Amino acid sequence: MSVQPFTELQMSPPSHDAGVQAHAPDTGRATPVRDGNPAKNELRVIRGIETKVTVDANGNKVIETEKTSVNPSEVTKSYDNFWNNFLQQQISYREKYPERYDAIMAAQFEPRVLDRIQRMMEEVPDEHGAAKKWKINSEELHKFLQTKQGLALTTSLVEDQMILEAAAMAKEQKNGFNPAAMRWGYRLAAAEKMWDFASQQQNADYLREIWGIDVQDVNRPTSLIEQIKNPAQFFRANQVKETLGGAAALRESLKAAYDTRGIYYRDVLGYKGKLQASPAQFLIDYLYSNGKATPEELDTEFNKQFLRQYEPNLWGIQDRNHNTPESRRGVRNPNFDRRNLDDAGNIDRFFEARRKVQGEIAADLLSQEKLDRDAHELQEKKHAVEVRAAMEPNDPSFVKRREAAEAEKEKLGKEIAEISSRDADFIEYRDKTEAMNNITHALRVENGLTTIADGMQKTDVVNAVAAEDVRLQTNFDASKAALDAALTTNVDAANASLNTDIHTATIRLNTDIYTLNTTLRGTIDGLRTTLATNIDAENTTLQGAIDGINTALADTRVRSRGARTILGEIQGEIQAEKNRILSATPGLRSSRDEARAEAAATAAIDAARPGQRLRAEQEIKRQEARIKSLTDAAEARIKLLRDDHEAHVKQLQDNNAAEVKKLRDDNAAEVAKLRADNAAHVKKLQDDNAAEVQRLDSERIDRMEKLKQLRDEYVQLVGDRSKVEERLISGMPRGELVKMREAYDSIVTIGSISPADISNRTVEDLVKSIKRQAGTGTFVHIPRNTKLDQIRELVIRAKAEQAALDEQRYITSPADHLANFTAITTGVHRGGGGTVANPITDDELVYLDENTLRLRLENEYGWDPADELNNWQKRAKARVEARQRLAIRSKTLADVTKANLEERKKQVEEKASKDGPKKEAIRKNEILKATDMLCDEQDHMMTESRHVIEAIDEYTDVRPIDPADQTYSDAEKKLNAPRGYIKMLEYFGYDRNKSSMKDRNDQLQLMQRVIDPAELANRIYETLPQLHARVAAGSARDISVVLTGMRDAVRAGDVHDDDLRTATRAMLREMLDVALQIE
Amino acid sequence: MQLTTLNIIKILPIEEQNKQELLANFDTYSREKKFLIEQIVWGVYDALFKSTLEEKLELGRLEAEKNNRELGPDFYDKMRKEAEEEIMSQSVSAVEKVDLDVARQQLASVISEENTN
């Protein structure tokens, strides 16, 4: 049987009975108007503590309220939070849907309450003075919360919110399944529970009457997912859904609401016990406790029986006198309250039904037949524990077996430890090998030394690196020569290019100068022509003027004849006179005669022409002066022209000379630049060449340094690994390589055990298998009487050889290593004439000294002593291969041996463990004894429970025990537990007044098996959920913390004696269950 | 009246015959059977007490509501005390009745034995 709880839950009342629901606090809420049915549109009646309800002459209910002074601060605070959330939601909705808001609110609240709610929201002007924003009117809110009406309405709204949570979930899923919305899990549970709740008739009535949610005409979805997908079918109270805010906000308000409701009941009503769940309370309680702490489960046996006793469908909704809500059709029974439920009558009937069911269940449980059956089953289980414990022998054979097993385990353990002690060498060998391979890989792949192979001898690596050094130097020299040649060519080309450029520039200069000079000459010629023209013009003009004057002087046509004409006439007349005078005196005449004649003639003419000659002469002189003036002016102008011309010509010539000079300067600069550029270019070519040469040289040096570094590391590693290899090899017995190969041949090659099997099957498995086949079939070569140990040796060696072969597949050895190794170990004669009689074995290759090996190869294999250098290399390579093979086999042999030892150790342990449960049984038996002892004290505990509550300070005293206090035993003091723990042990039956200290200590020791301080603390914590709000789960095993929490819970009235009894019974059942669970 | 397993058995609403047998033979039962009986008996008692308490609470609140009376912070404690007193008084009378029945039965048994002898 199971001693699973058979009373506690079943004895609890159902959750959603109408009788209890009838006592939810009253509100001023109106039943929502949905279908126009007058009965359904009736205002919900206010039934708050402070309200009075009467019916007026027209049958309408009249509500009166009273204000009270009840105002616990905690309640107000919590309600304040709730209302702030609620009003904020309202404001949000109002601002979002202003056109719908009034209608929705009017449908939900009666005018009086609506008015109150409206007053708690005030419209505030925006910055422009327009009233657009809403905010909470805190003053009105606080005023409202001063009244009991406020408290009652709040509680009602809280319950509303709880119911609406389910609807919120449905609404939230309207557009599809949203996993994020499920993160708290409770939404799904809410929908499920909501439907479960509504599926019961009385609950459906409750929803319809109180909340206006009619589920009668809603088809139940076929599955939970369907509920999620089709929320519109689930709840049709559209006005309710539309007023919901976001789910997150609602969840927060629900939490506040839940607290609020609790505070209301506890602090206002002083209702300290577990609340009888209203539908909403049930929902929220279920949801927020992850489905664990449901006060009442649906569909329990109790619930079914209860419904049978209290069947609304059978009896209908009746008043205390079993009358229906209507005294006759259409006429209401005045005894009924506004919810058509006669509260007191239904409460009576509810509890009567409940007690009746409790009695029936008790009667069933206490039937002698059932008790005997259950007790017998319990005894059988206990007996099984006792029997097993009794089988724990003191019999020598068992002890001997166990001791032998322990000894064997110890021996195997030592051997394992010994092998394990070499693990470091194996690891080091592996690490060194890997490091070597990394280097050879680097040399081969990254540095192109293709001759390098894994596992190569260090001399080979050294030689390869040296060869690479030479190769790199040669390459460098060639590169340098090529670079130098290229440099010469490039410099020559640059110089040639320079000369060409200079030549070109010079030609261009000369051409430019020539052009300039030609232009200058042309210009000057032009200027000269212009000058000559201008001078000619000037002269012409002047000559014209002179000619005019002369003409005028000589003109005979004019009335006033020209002076020169007149003078000429006069001079002619004078001459004629003179001539006449002179003719008068022939012969030679002196100049004086001439002059006298001249003068006499002149005087004669002047006399004849008085004043004419003087005027003519004066006129002539005047005109000549005029001519001279004109001539001077013309000459001056001509001179100016000449001067300007000269200046202009000079300017042009100067400019030309400057231009030419500039051309020459530019040319000189260009040439200089060409030369400089060329010099720079040539220098760059030289520098680049030098840099490249340097780079190549550095690259060569760097590479060589790296190669040398790798070489040195390799050489170092080879040396280091050789030391490890030496240790590993020295740990292998001589001839082991041969033995392993022979064992492999025997088991695998001849015995036909596949390589996969030899690898994968365990040694012991193979040993058993081969032992069975020995002397027959493929194992005919192994005698039937071969001992298991001998077969095991063979198998271990064969497995190790297989493992070595597997491992070797991944080792890239130089080909000549294996070739020389194979040639020697298979006895290939140098002359090619077959094999030698006694080939050198693998082991001998490792262990023979150099001289012996050399002589044997010369004498037996025909190796030529004259070719000793080559012989030496071949021997060395073969030796390297042999040593490596031996080292690998050293590891694989150790691995296989170790695995086999562990396997055998495990077998020994398993065999020993088959005897082990008996030991465990003894422990279980002690636990059972301890539990039995506690169970025997159950009646004592039940009786003492009240005393514990009354003296709770004593039972939860967390002060440490005074070491000097003689009332405590040494054993009690050693527990290092608080005083309350010892006192609590007394509640569990610990007798500190036993006649002997031994008995007292024995009892204490036995109790420690099941309720040591930490265990007792945890059990109290687990069975008293009232502590969960006071004790953190992490401190559940701290006896002082738990006792303190318990004390506080008792003081607060959250834990009473019946709670303690319930917890104690659960604790004992749990302990008994544990004690009876034996593997 | 002190609450003990036997006293509670006396007040349980179970068949009289079974009740008498439990009371008469309780001490002779195995420890397992005693343990199971105690579990049931005390569980039933606590459940009955809770029912009584809750009924008191509901009725008390209803009464206060109808009479427009405040409940006050000591309401729960008062109701609890009333429930204890009620169940105790019912228990005492039930126990007395059962004790009387047992005494009668024992007397009848003695008489029967004497007659047999």
Image (cartoon, grey):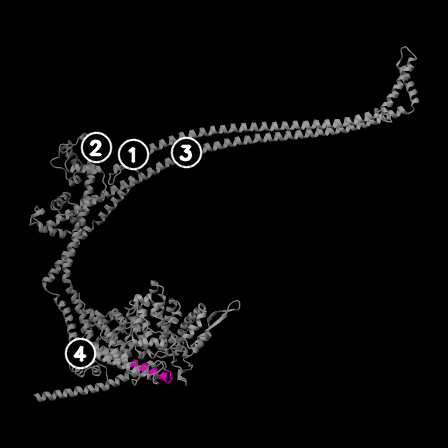
Q: CA distance from mark 3 to mark 1?
A: 26 Å
Q: Residues within 10 Å of mark 2 (few under 14, many from 20)?
A: few
Image quadrant in which the N terminus of chain A is located: bottom left
- The earlier-in-sequence mark between 1 and 4 is 4
Q: Which residue is mark 3?
A: A690
Q: CA distance from mark 1 to mark 2?
A: 19 Å
Q: Nearer the viewer, mark 4 or mark 3?
A: 4
Q: CA distance from mark 1 to mark 4?
A: 104 Å
Q: Secondary structure at mark 2?
A: helix
Q: Say what amino acid the circle numbered 1 marks.
A: Ala
Q: Which residue is mark 4?
A: A367
Q: Say what amino acid the circle numbered 3 marks.
A: Ala
Q: Say what amino acid the circle numbered 2 marks.
A: Asn
**Which mark is drawn over residue A467?**
1
- For disc 1, the chain is A
Q: Which residue is mark 2?
A: A870
Q: Secondary structure at mark 1?
A: helix
| Image: magenta residue range | B52-70
The residue lying toward the viewer, choosing from A630 and A275, is A630
Q: In which quarter of the view is residue A165 placed? A: bottom left
Q: In which quarter of the view is residue A288 placed? A: bottom left
Q: Position of residue A985 (x, y in %)?
A: 24, 74
Asked if the residue at tag 3 contacts the one at tag 4, i.e. Cβ–Cβ closer than 8 Å, the answer is no
Q: Say what amino acid the circle numbered 4 marks.
A: Ser
- The earlier-in-sequence mark between 3 and 2 is 3
Q: Is residue A592 visible?
A: no
**Which mark is drawn over residue A565?**
none
The residue lying toward the viewer, choosing from A335 and A255, is A335
